Image: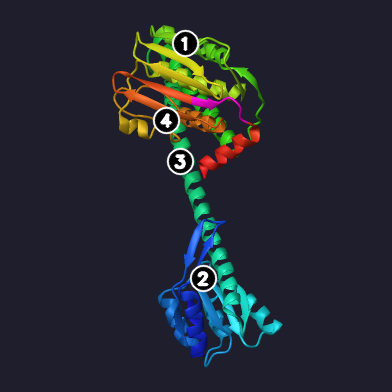
Amino acid sequence: MLVVDDEPGMRMGVARALGDCHFDLTDIDQRVAFTVETADTGEKALEMIRASEPDILLLDHKLPGMSGLDVLDHVGRSDHMLTIMITAYASLETAVSAIKQGAYDFLAKPFTPSELKTTIRRAAETLITARQARRLAQEKRQVRFEFIRVVAHELKSPLAAVEGYLQIVRDRTAGDDQATYDHMLDRCLIRTRHMRKLIVDLLDLTHIESGRKKRELAEVDVRALADTAVETAMPDARARSITLQIHGSGPLLMMADAGEIEIVLNNLVSNAVKYNRDNGRVDVRLGGDADTITIAVTDTGIGMSKEETSRLFGEFVRIKNDRTRNILGSGLGLSIVRRLATLYGGEVRVESEPDVGSTFTVVLSRKVRADQAVEAVQDHDA
């Protein structure tokens, strides 16, 4: 804080009142203390502001030489500094002029230490809140930019591949062998399915994070939903001689949106098949107690290191190495699983060992109200 006043007693009094003062701003979880500097003229104040702009400027209106309003006119409005005018001439006209020129508040002489602290506290809270809002806005812009960049990258590669294959098919540059063109068309279909999955995952993620996804909570049987997830993954599993088995007798009931639990199960089971080895196996274990449901999916696949598992649940995170190079994925599935687990007051964790396999465990609360679920996601994101 910079205190600008031509009266030595005023400068010393403000410095003494605020020198050992601190405020706990509970609404924004901040503790504020003050370092007080002083100036006896407007000219000196401008020099000090140019050298190092203070957070709060406590500025006397009547000064020798430049007036406080003159100083305010030179300083102008600032996003980083709040000005409080102090004067013995507390006329409405002076207050209006100061506010028009960018002052935040007005403090009339004589004022008590309590009045000073109340005004300064209000200014500090306004200043810190504004800074937090600007920082949050900048972070959101950065996240949005990164999100768009990654989406564009994820769509660019499969689109380029499809375009290249279709041009070859159109121009018949691969000769007259129909099997060659059939293979290219198959690759196009695989790529378009990958892009469709990416778009669906993006929609799921944005709906969950925004809280706009319409949720229909009812009693659902997790065992029945697991049967459906296994049935859906069975064709891919059979193609690679992977055994799929569910452990745990049903029914296993909980209050949930059936579609959300399906997303969790489909992601876990499909990943267990996708990242498995040929002739491997996937075990889906279901259990729980009076309060929770536990879903554990174990595979005998390529596994991961501790460093890889530590970053596994972020958006667009895919573990890239020689073993995963040819495996397509959006990098969003596990992030969605994590968000949904949070919706149900639960968690997701992974245990994995390279070349041995992985176990993903999701724990969900059996009874979560819709309003509690929204609060859980907001708290998690905060």
Name the disc covering residue 157, or none: 4
Q: Which amino acid does label 1 sit on?
A: His
**Disc 1 element:** strand
Q: Position of residue 6 (x, y in %)?
A: 51, 90
CA gap, disc 3 and disc 2: 35 Å
Rendered residue at 61%/24% (across/down): 256
Single out the residue that lies furthest toward the front.
290
**Residue occupied by mark 2:** 81
Q: Position of residue 30 (x, y in %)?
A: 50, 59
Boundaries of the magenta span: 363-368
Residue nearer the viewer, 27 or 1 = 27
* Dot 2 alpha-carbon crowd within 10 angstroms: few under 14, some 14 to 19, many 20 or more: some
**Residue occupied by mark 1:** 247
Q: Where is residue 1 in the image (x, y as percent from the top left)?
A: 48, 74
Picture quadrant where residue 369 is located: top right
CA gap, disc 4 and disc 3: 13 Å
**Disc 3 element:** helix
CA gap, disc 1 and disc 4: 39 Å
CA gap, disc 1 and disc 3: 42 Å
